């Protein structure tokens, strides 16, 4: 019998259930050779060594884990002594990274139960005592983990799975259940709500009813999380291959509005009786691309999320008599400035978003040498994909998108023909040129 205190108020007494090798489906052939090397080596040196977290969860489901995390009773300095190819990272809680070419195996020492409770003590102290306080036993380590299915330990000693929290049963019933009281656990770290959505969608698991209820109530807490951390989480959420389902679930729990407030408001405004479909279509395309093994970029999705908010603001400015170019620039600046308060966006991302947006009016200029120059723009492809999205969702003329599709595929001779200005029965040659020049400069050429 092992007694573990998750918090003062709630002592937890649990006994680990050990699933022997014959009672589970994790085989060593599914584990990366490098992870096995780390586990075996730690064991040979006399330490306990387990695989833990997402990799055990994924192996049980017969999926290929993204990475392999190791938990051990060896302290970081001891881990470093065992592996030459090892670097210690993190200040307060030190982790060991063991490098094998491009693969990194993260080795974490078991965390103690006092770790969160004695935060201040830990921060104000340095040295040995502090460490004693942070590091703990496997029985303590388990309680700081988020979901029961993420808290299973694969023991290299006998290939068993160690389960303190009923994670195996939850696996079988495809349930995502928080360890401990959901409200407390969400309050401790509101990012766990985003993780709940991510795992529910990725694994096809149901949220346990208590967890679900708390999520509705706790969504607002997410706004207290630093924008930089939320940016990292948002990438994981939307570059997962299940972006559309994730988006819908985040909206359902009121989490999306904390992450993308301007997008959420714009989704509420219908256009000709239809909801705004561009973000939805962008997510769908992104999932399809992932399924085909193609790359997806974060900036494209953010550009899609924030396109409508920029349009709305720009139109307000135009109505106030502000010049078109300035109106769009200012609108983009304002929308981005607001967004980075919720989820930080690195500069390369906002630059790329702006480029995609600013290419859009340029697609209207179909005559003369402009198309041949536009096509060499480094973001042409993304800009064109964005134009397609707009045309599919009622924001641009489908004929325009088709024209650009054809222009890219055809021969140079044909391209020249396509970009000839329309000839009109006209005697006054210079007058015609002037009129054309005017059209090009105000961007109206080719839209009629
Ligand atoms: P993924 O497949 O996305 O890597 P993962 O479960 O491995 O999923 P990580 O972020 O790599 O997720 O975290 C590893 C483990 O650390 C988790 O399985 C969980 O046990 C624990 N963990 C991570 N983040 C939290 C958190 N915010 N609160 C509690 N435990 C966490
Ligand atoms: Mg992981």
Image (tube, grey):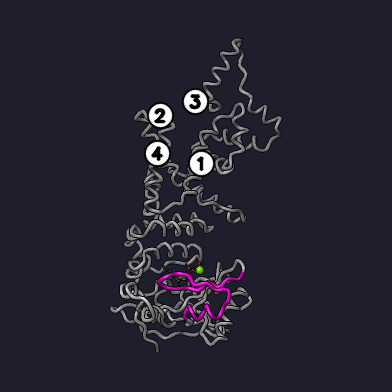
Residue that numbered label 4 is attached to: 331
Q: Which residue is mark 1?
A: 355
Packing grade of label 4 (10 A; few <14, some 14-19, many >=20) is many
| Cα–Cα span, label 2 and label 3 | 12 Å
Secondary element type, mark 1: helix
Give the answer, above or below, for where 248 lies relative to 94: above
Which x, y percent locates residue 358? 49, 37
Q: Earlier in the sequence, mark 1 or mark 3?
A: 1
Residue drawn 32% across the image and 70% down it: 184
Query: Which stretch is magenta?
Result: 75-100
Label 2 or label 4, whichever comes before in sequence order: 2
Going by the picture, which residue comes out furthest to the top?
A: 427
**Mark 1 and 3 residues: CB-CB less than 8 Å, in contact?**
no
Say if residue 270 shows up in the picture: yes
- N-term mark: 2 or 3: 2
**Which residue position is annotated with label 2?**
323
- Dot 1 or dot 2, earlier in sequence: 2
Q: Quadrant of the N terminus?
A: bottom left
Crowd tier of the residue under label 3, counting other residues whose Cα lies within 10 Å: few below 14, some 14–19, many 20 or above = few
């Amino acid at each position: 019998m092992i007694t573990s205190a998750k918090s003062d108020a709630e002592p937890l007494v649990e006994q680990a259930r050990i699933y022997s090798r014959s009672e589970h489906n994790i085989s060593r052939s599914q584990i990366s050779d490098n992870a096995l090397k780390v586990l075996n080596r730690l064991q040979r040196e006399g330490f306990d060594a387990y695989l833990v977290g997402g990799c055990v969860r994924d192996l049980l489901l017969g999926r290929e884990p993204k990475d392999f995390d190791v938990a051990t009773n060896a302290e970081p300095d001891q881990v470093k002594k065992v592996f030459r190819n090892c670097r210690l990272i993190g200040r307060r809680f030190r982790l060991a990274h063991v490098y094998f070419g491009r693969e990194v195996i993260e080795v974490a020492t078991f965390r103690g139960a006092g770790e969160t409770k004695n935060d201040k003590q830990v921060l104000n102290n340095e040295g040995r005592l502090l460490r004693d306080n942070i590091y703990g036993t496997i029985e303590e380590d388990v309680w700081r983990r988020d979901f029961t299915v993420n808290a299973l330990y694969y023991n290299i000693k006998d290939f068993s799975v160690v389960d303190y929290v009923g994670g195996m049963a939850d696996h079988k019933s495809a349930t995502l259940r928080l360890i401990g009281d959901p409200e407390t656990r969400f309050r401790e770290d509101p990012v766990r709500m985003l993780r709940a959505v991510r795992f529910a969608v990725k694994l096809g698991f149901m949220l346990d009813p208590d967890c679900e209820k708390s999520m509705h109530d706790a969504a607002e807490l997410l706004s207290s999380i630093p924008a930089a951390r939320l940016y990292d989480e948002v990438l994981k959420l939307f570059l997962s291959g299940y972006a559309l389902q994730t988006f819908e679930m985040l909206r359902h729990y009121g989490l999306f509005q904390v992450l993308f407030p301007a997008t959420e408001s714009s989704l509420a405004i219908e256009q000709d009786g239809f909801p705004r479909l561009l973000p939805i279509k962008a997510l769908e395309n992104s999932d399809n691309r992932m399924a085909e093994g193609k790359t997806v970029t974060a900036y494209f999705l953010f550009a899609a999320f924030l396109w409508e908010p920029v349009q709305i603001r720009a139109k307000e400015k135009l109505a106030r008599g502000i010049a078109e170019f300035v109106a769009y620039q200012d609108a983009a600046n304002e929308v981005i400035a607001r967004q980075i308060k919720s989820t930080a966006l690195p500069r390369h991302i906002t630059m790329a978003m702006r480029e995609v947006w600013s290419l859009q009016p340029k697609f209207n200029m179909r005559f003369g040498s402009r198309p041949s120059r536009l096509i060499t723009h480094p973001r042409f492809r993304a800009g064109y994909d964005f134009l397609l999205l707009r045309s599919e969702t009622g924001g641009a003329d489908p004929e325009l998108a088709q024209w650009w599709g054809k222009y890219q595929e055809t021969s140079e001779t044909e391209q020249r023909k396509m970009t000839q200005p329309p000839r009109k029965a006209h005697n006054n040659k210079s007058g015609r040129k002037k009129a054309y020049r005017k059209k090009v400069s105000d961007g109206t050429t080719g839209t009629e």
